[in-house]
Image (spheres, rainbow, N blue to C red):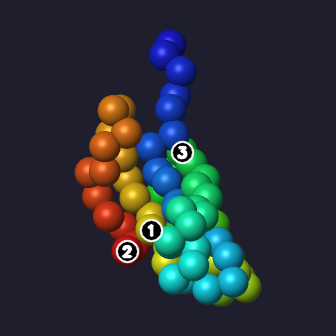
Amino acid sequence: MPKREPRFEVLWYVGHDLANARNDGNYETKEFYTRKAALKFYEEHKNDVGKFDWWVTHRNADWEVIEDIII
């Protein structure tokens, strides 16, 4: 049986403010196996201090975005 790969990603910028975080390229990502788990993580952390501009995506086997879930 082939190894199951994560297909959902949550990306967010970190820092004191969004402009500096984007300019500095300060971002983090987390991968998930299910949409439900990715959205749960997003909902739990979307208001965390120092985290900005969330992007939740569904990706194919080549890790290309096939669906923007939250932009």
The image shows a total of numbered marks equal to: 3
At mark 1, the secondary structure is: strand
Question: Helix, strand, or loop for circle 3?
Answer: loop
Which picture quadrant has residue 37? Answer: bottom right
Furthest toward the left, the residue is 66
Residue density around tag 2, few if under 14, some if 14–19, many if 20 or more, within 10 Å: few
C-alpha gap between disc 3 and disc 2:
19 Å
Q: Nearer the viewer, mark 3 or mark 2?
A: 2
Instruction: Kindly indicate the quadrant of the structure image that contains residue 47.
Output: bottom right
Chain-order first, disc 1 or disc 2? 1
Q: Can residue 40 be seen by looking at this rendering?
A: no
Above or below residue 11? Residue 53 is: below
Residue type at mark 3?
Tyr
Report if the CB atoms under discs 1 and 2 are less than 8 Å apart: yes
Q: Can you give x and y, in whole percent of width and height, for residue 58 in the image?
A: 38, 53
- Return the residue at label 2: 71
Provide the residue designation for mark 1: 55
Residue at point 40% right, 58% down? 57
Viewer can see residue 3: yes
Say which of 29 and 60 sits in front. 29
- Residue 3 vs 38, above or below: the answer is above
Looking at the rendered structure, which numbered label has been put on residue 3?
none
Q: Give percent across and percent down for residue 43.
A: 60, 77
Check disc 3 and report the residue beneath it.
33
Query: Disc 1 to disc 3, how far (Cα)?
Result: 16 Å
| Left or right: residue 53 compared with residue 30 | left
- In the image, residue 56 lies at what x, y percent? 45, 64
Pick the front one: 25 or 43: 25
